Image (cartoon, coloured by chain):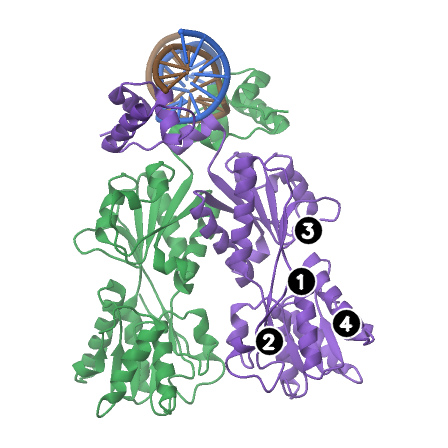
Chain colours: A green, B purple, C blue, D brown
DNA sequence: CTGAAAGCGCTAACAA
DNA sequence: TTGTTAGCGCTTTCAG
């Protein structure tokens, strides 16, 4: 048996299709009696509107596009995978579906635009992480709301969900200072990424606040990319320095892990000889040996907030460009302080933003 | 400026809309000249068909529904998250989008059906993991292809992508026997799950093959659920046994990890006093201490194969019910054999199916 | 408050 | 090989 259409409902309820439409979408005015009569028939027939018909008539898709750089997705990179799952959750709560697409590192042609944009198959777009600004320009031309996650563009403002990177860097450096370290190095790759730049900036600020000279030779931001291997490379260079730093603050956990590998490989002790702190709190960080001190970023929450913000823009036609900074949390573990208790939760500290 | 429609293209190209439709969808016969003329206009105008219009006219959505039990998704459970990502990958290659939905453990009402089914917004369905058979019945009534992942129903056949659980269990038990263990226990929860039942069955078969009596008191399948905590509970009971087993094969890594926690907590040594092997190779297994010997399941591949199979069914109207068993791989690590080299890859073994 | 009617943009017979 | 013509099922003015 075929599925009932809106016409069937109208006929059974003895009213017009437009009335049924109004009732099932709960807009406009309908008398209580009519509404109930229609609802009853809807129940009986098991009627449910077909998405593509609604879409064609109303020019909405009920979908949200989630765009990620391919290298962030394909290696099943733990950070953005979490953000994506957070978005999935929130979308389901708001009755949207999430369509996923990836872009190349350097966006080249209109050919590379996600299919869902060309097909008009999304009502709004979330872009997670750093992508080519030219790409964002192209996306903008489709005239649908956009929310950025963990990324900003210089010349233009977008609604965006950001990490409180500076506050996090302050917490990390404060902690290392509290552990008695005076010579704290910074390791970062792809420093053009606004988030990583902010972490470096926060590091600088905090040292200055404590009247400690920022030493350029202890700031290693040569690596093009913030992956584990590159953390190891940077650390190798830092170990050449005389005197060498007694602590390292890495721009993210991946690089911090690379640093740790390099330090251990050189027969040095952690945190005895060198203390290490990272940023992100990816899953691996709490499972490795020694467990990594880091700043916990609430990844699912980033995705969730982005969806909430986007849905508000879609539904209310909000034109206000919201910017939210999500606080981070310092997780002190063995890589930074010998004396840390097993219960890491005792020493958590929230950023205050 | 408004986006061009198929009519605009037809007008510019001096032909009818149906010709344009045929060209852009690459079906039916069109003269080379006409085709090229149309393509040229398509390029110039930057035309791209709107998904919902195509959907309404052709009764296809271009989407695949992926259904997961809520407790498998919400805790961001690592196993199914991977399977889902694998499906995402494959879908993108085949020009489909994946819509995600979850079902409660016990499906109750038509109300609980995924919205994308009611809205006719998917062309096929993937169901991952164990769900209520009544739920599958309901899904079937929508008359679209279904592929099951890691699950079977007794009374009916479905296309399905399965794990070669028996072969895996054989490898595990063989390995433990080779390490000199004669008294090998089995720990499992939710043994009604076909996959877990097969692992137990494989364990039994292999012991019998070696003329070792299968001892019921060393088979602990009381726990309702195969989570870490329950692994610990089961292990606690096994440690009461006299004599106690010298090795444990757990139905999955989560329970194996619980076993390890319990063993260490009792001041025993791994693998000295008791060896442990798991199944799944979740990420945590290679990061913990001691690293867990387990059977690697190719989770992304499960998702990918499901999509490929499903898309074939959707496109070719294949009615053949394919069943694929994906091989697993034994990863020997410290939890089972003291003498294992750091390079675990040297001791991998594939199941032969 | 309710109904009639005009599409939304595309596909798929069916003719020509 | 190409064109004509019905819809697909719903939303949305616009009258009444």
> Which residue was labeled with disc 1?
B165
Q: Are marks 3 and 1 in contact (CB under 8 Å)?
A: no
Q: Secondary structure at mark 2?
A: loop
Q: Are marks 4 and 1 on the same chain?
A: yes
Asked which secondary structure carries label 4, the reply is: strand
Earlier-in-chain disc, 2 versus 3: 3
Image quadrant in which you'd find residue A154: bottom left
Which sits in the foreground, A132 or A184? A132
Chain letter of disc 3 in the image: B
Q: Are marks 1 and 2 in contact (CB under 8 Å)?
A: no
Residue behind mark 3? B152
Same chain for mark 4 and mark 3? The answer is: yes
SS under mark 3 = loop
Q: Quadrant of the N terminus of chain A?
A: top right
| Label 2 CA crowd tier, 10 Å (few <14, some 14–19, many 20+) | many
Is A84 on the left or on the right of B65, as rendered? left
Tell me how far mark 4 sits from mark 1, CA to CA.
17 Å
Residue at screen point 42% across, 31% down: B52
Would you say residue A173 is visible in this rendering?
no
Mark 4 lies on residue: B219
Disc number placed over residue A6 in the picture, else none? none
First in sequence, mark 4 or 1: give its number: 1
């Amino acid at each position: 048996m075929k599925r009932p259409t809106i016409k069937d409902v109208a006929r059974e309820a003895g009213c017009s299709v437009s009335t049924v439409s109004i009732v099932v979408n709960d807009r406009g005015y309908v008398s209580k009696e009519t509404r109930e009569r229609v609802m009853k028939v809807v129940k009986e027939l098991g009627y449910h509107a077909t998405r593509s018909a609604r879409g064609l008539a109303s020019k909405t898709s009920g979908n949200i596009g989630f765009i990620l750089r391919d290298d962030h997705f394909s290696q099943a990179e733990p950070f953005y995978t979490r953000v994506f799952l957070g978005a999935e959750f929130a979308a389901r709560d708001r009755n949207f579906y999430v369509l996923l697409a990836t872009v190349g590192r350097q966006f080249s042609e209109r050919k590379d635009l996600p299919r869902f944009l060309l097909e008009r198959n999304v009502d709004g777009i979330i872009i997670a992480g750093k992508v080519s600004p030219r790409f964002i320009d192209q996306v903008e031309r489709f005239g649908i709301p956009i929310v950025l996650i963990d990324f900003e563009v210089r010349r233009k403002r977008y609604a965006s969900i950001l990490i409180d990177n500076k506050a996090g860097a302050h917490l990390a450096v404060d902690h290392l200072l509290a552990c008695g370290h005076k010579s704290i190095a910074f390791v970062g790759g792809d420093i053009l990424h606004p988030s990583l730049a902010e972490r470096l900036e926060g590091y600088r600020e905090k040292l200055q606040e404590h009247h400690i000279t920022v030493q350029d030779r202890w700031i290693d931001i040569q690596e093009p990319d913030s992956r584990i291997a590159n953390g190891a490379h940077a650390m190798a260079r830092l170990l050449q320095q005389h005197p060498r730093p007694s602590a390292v603050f890495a721009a993210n956990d991946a690089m911090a892990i690379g640093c740790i590998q390099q330090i251990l490989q050189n027969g040095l002790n952690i945190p005895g000889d060198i203390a290490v702190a990272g940023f992100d709190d990816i899953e691996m960080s709490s499972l490795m040996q020694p467990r990594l001190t880091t700043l916990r970023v609430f990844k699912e929450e980033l995705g969730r907030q982005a969806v909430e913000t986007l849905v508000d823009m879609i539904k209310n036609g909000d034109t206000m460009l919201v910017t939210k900074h999500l606080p981070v949390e310092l997780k002190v573990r063995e890589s930074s302080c010998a004396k840390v208790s097993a219960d890491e939760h005792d020493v958590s500290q929230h950023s205050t933003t």
